[in-house]
Image (cartoon, rainbow, N blue to C red):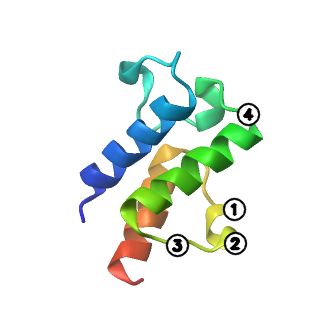
Amino acid sequence: MTKDEIFIAIKKATLDVLPLVNEHDISADKQLFDLGANSIDRSEIVINTMQSLGLKVSPSELGKVKNIQGLIDALYDAASGR
């Protein structure tokens, strides 16, 4: 699994939860909060992404995530067994 595939899954989950967001506004340097996601939306996006990728990441690891790139990296590390 590549980081690009993970980013695509995050974008899909984000668009499913926040349908008014423009796909082109989603970039790795943004925070989900910047896109209008409240805490429930962010949780739903992360859970949906993990389910679609068949991954599990501990809440303590997710707590370190600051932006979408951080989420990509955390999911990539989980997929790589790190």
Residue 10 pos. (x, y %): 43, 45
- Mark yes or no: residue 63 visible: yes
Q: Which residue is mark 3?
A: 56
Judge the density around disc 4: few (<14), some (14-19), many (≥20) Cα neighbours within 10 Å: few
Judge the density around disc 3: few (<14), some (14-19), many (≥20) Cα neighbours within 10 Å: some
Q: Nearer the viewer, mark 1 or mark 3?
A: 3
Q: Which residue is mark 4?
A: 38
Kind of residue sitting beneath label 4? Asn
Kind of residue sitting beneath label 3? Lys
Q: Which residue is mark 2?
A: 60
Mark seen at residue 46: none
What's the distance in space between the residues labelled 3 and 2, CA to CA?
12 Å
Does the CB distance between marks 4 and 3 fall below 8 Å? no
What's the distance in space between the residues labelled 1 and 3, CA to CA?
14 Å
Mark seen at residue 63: 1
Q: Nearer the viewer, residue 70 or 51?
A: 51
Q: Nearer the viewer, mark 3 or mark 2?
A: 3
